[in-house]
């Protein structure tokens, strides 16, 4: 599987993260998005007319949408990543749609603040705050019912779809301090075996052995 | 003698598991609230004395809090014990973080300013030397009448932030501690920037999911009153 990838894109990171957590190897092709805008070149538009990343190529199958790619990798991973019941599968579909909304709110605020994308920052932040509150409520209610993740007993593509935009919200001026349930959920996601980082989203350092550099330094 | 210290509710105990750190505030001062692996809760000024990074971005290993920036590591007394860039150095004990009092009651973490040397410079973020009283003062002992009278069997519900001034929220609810429908107790914490947190507890017979949704409605009411 080839992933056309941009290291700073939350939507690309979703795919890299799910592939890492489920042990599905990807061949990464780095695309010069900023400042090169190569994703809008003729060859990339031929592959994905939407002009977006990530793009996954798997033989004849080409997917140019992160939710579609998560759906594929989740279904191949099994073990609850795409839902164990029709009800859970439907709940997951709801969260995939919510993740797209996050992209247009918290993700938009980040794009405006970081790379000067067009749009109103205060309006994007207000939408982002409303979305973070909805996620906080859902996760708080899951916790009151004994759950850790958004759907079912185990992590699913619902968590992976929402995680990057939420974690990067501070890049767009949206603090995560008001959300205790999101904080605990983000720890649970980062504690999953095989978790990988992206710039701006770090692992739980306390889970790694303490670095001992003394001998190398001397 | 009544406790002259004003204790602020800062978080639900459940929301600060062992070996984690979170941001909160004591009045206008930003605070890093953390729990060691062994369970001890500490509240410090939220800036590393080295380069001013927020300690609430840091991480907990064992009984120490590490700054995320250069890894300066502080023990539960807020004294710097390790500077990774100088592995052979025993840091001078004058490198400290200003501390607040912290206590746990009723499943809630309460914090209060200190009056002794360990709390000096809380506003300025300049820790003074490890002074008299360090570790010996009332870290965990609020006087019984210093906290609101809460029944002993309440369980944690949720903490929500409200975009409205703490005093106005307390006014609207009829007090800094209020009972609302569904067996829910709400504790109001004033936060900087005209915000407040509602730390809520529920009695064991209560329906927690329904209560969570009523709190969402309560927040909508509090914020729309403010906008009106």
Image (tube, rainbow, N blue to C red):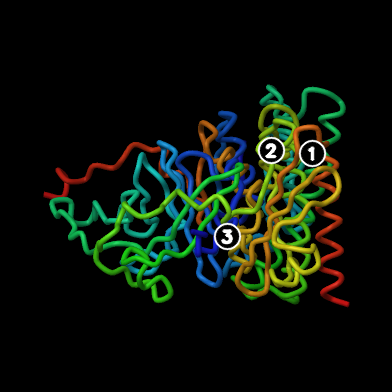
Residue at the limit of the structure toward the front, as seen here:
B1
- Residue A71 seen from this side: no
Residue at image mark 3: B8
Mark 3 is surrounded, within 10 Å at the Cα level, by few (under 14), some (14 to 19) or many (20 or more) other residues, namely many
- Between the C-alphas of marks 3 and 2, the distance is 19 Å
Residue plotted at (51% across, 33% down): A194
Residue at image mark 2: B155
Mark 2 is surrounded, within 10 Å at the Cα level, by few (under 14), some (14 to 19) or many (20 or more) other residues, namely many
Task: Give the answer, above or below, for where A67 lies relative to A112.
Answer: above
Q: Are marks 2 and 1 in contact (CB under 8 Å)?
A: yes
Q: State which quadrant residue B47 falls in.
A: bottom left
Residue A51, image x, y percentages: 73, 59
Tell me the chain of label 3: B
Say which label, 3 or 2, has the lower sequence index: 3
Between label 1 and label 3, give the one nearer the viewer.
Answer: 3
- Between B195 and B118, the one nearer to me in the picture: B118
Q: Are marks 3 and 2 in contact (CB under 8 Å)?
A: no
Mark 1, secondary structure of its residue: helix
Residue A157, image x, y percentages: 70, 37
The N terminus of chain A: image quadrant: top right
Task: Give the answer, above or below, for where A25 lies relative to A140.
Answer: above
Residue at image mark 1: B208
Mark 3, secondary structure of its residue: strand
Mark 2, secondary structure of its residue: strand
Tell me the chain of label 1: B
Are dots 3 and 2 on a single chain?
A: yes
């Amino acid at each position: 599987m080839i992933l056309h990838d941009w290291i700073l894109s939350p939507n690309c990171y979703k795919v890299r993260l799910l592939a890492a957590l489920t042990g599905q190897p990807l061949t990464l092709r780095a695309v010069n998005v900023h400042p090169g805008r190569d994703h809008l070149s003729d060859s990339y538009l031929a592959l994905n007319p939407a002009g977006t990343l990530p793009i996954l190529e798997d033989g004849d199958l080409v997917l140019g949408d992160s939710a579609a790619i998560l759906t594929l990798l989740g279904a191949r991973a099994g073990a609850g990543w795409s839902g164990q019941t029709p009800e859970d599968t439907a709940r997951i579909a709801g969260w995939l749609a919510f993740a797209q909304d996050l992209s247009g709110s918290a993700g938009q605020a980040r794009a405006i603040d970081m790379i000067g994308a067009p749009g109103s920052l205060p309006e994007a932040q207000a939408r982002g705050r409303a979305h973070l509150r909805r996620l906080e409520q859902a996760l708080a209610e899951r916790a009151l019912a004994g759950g850790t993740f958004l759907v079912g007993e185990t992590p699913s593509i619902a968590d992976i779809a929402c995680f990057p935009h939420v974690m990067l919200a501070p890049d767009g001026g949206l603090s995560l301090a008001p959300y205790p349930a999101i904080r605990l959920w983000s720890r649970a996601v980062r504690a999953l075996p095989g978790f990988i980082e992206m710039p701006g989203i770090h692992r739980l350092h306390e889970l790694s052995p303490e670095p001992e550099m003394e001998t190398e330094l001397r | 003698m009544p406790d002259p210290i004003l204790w602020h509710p800062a978080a639900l105990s459940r929301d600060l598991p062992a070996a984690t750190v979170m941001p909160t505030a004591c009045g206008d001062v930003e605070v890093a609230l953390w729990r060691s692996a062994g369970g001890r809760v500490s509240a410090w000024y939220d800036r590393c004395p080295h380069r001013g990074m927020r300690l609430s971005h840091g991480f907990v290993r064992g009984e120490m809090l590490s700054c995320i920036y250069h890894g300066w590591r502080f023990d539960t007394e807020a004294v710097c014990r390790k500077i990774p860039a100088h592995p052979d150095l025993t840091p001078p004990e004058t490198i400290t973080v200003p501390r607040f009092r912290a206590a746990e009651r009723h499943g809630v973490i309460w914090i209060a300013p200190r009056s002794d040397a360990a709390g000096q410079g809380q506003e300025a973020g300049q820790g003074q030397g490890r002074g008299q009283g360090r570790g010996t003062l009332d870290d965990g002992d609020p006087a019984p009448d210093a906290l609101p009278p809460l029944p002993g069997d309440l369980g944690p519900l949720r903490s929500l932030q409200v975009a409205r001034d703490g005093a106005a929220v307390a006014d609207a609810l009829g007090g800094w501690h209020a009972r609302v429908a569904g067996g829910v107790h709400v504790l109001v914490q004033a936060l900087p920037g005209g915000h407040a947190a509602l730390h809520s507890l529920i009695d064991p017979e209560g329906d927690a999911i329904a209560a969570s949704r009523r709190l969402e409605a309560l927040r909508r009411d509090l914020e729309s009153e403010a906008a009106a």
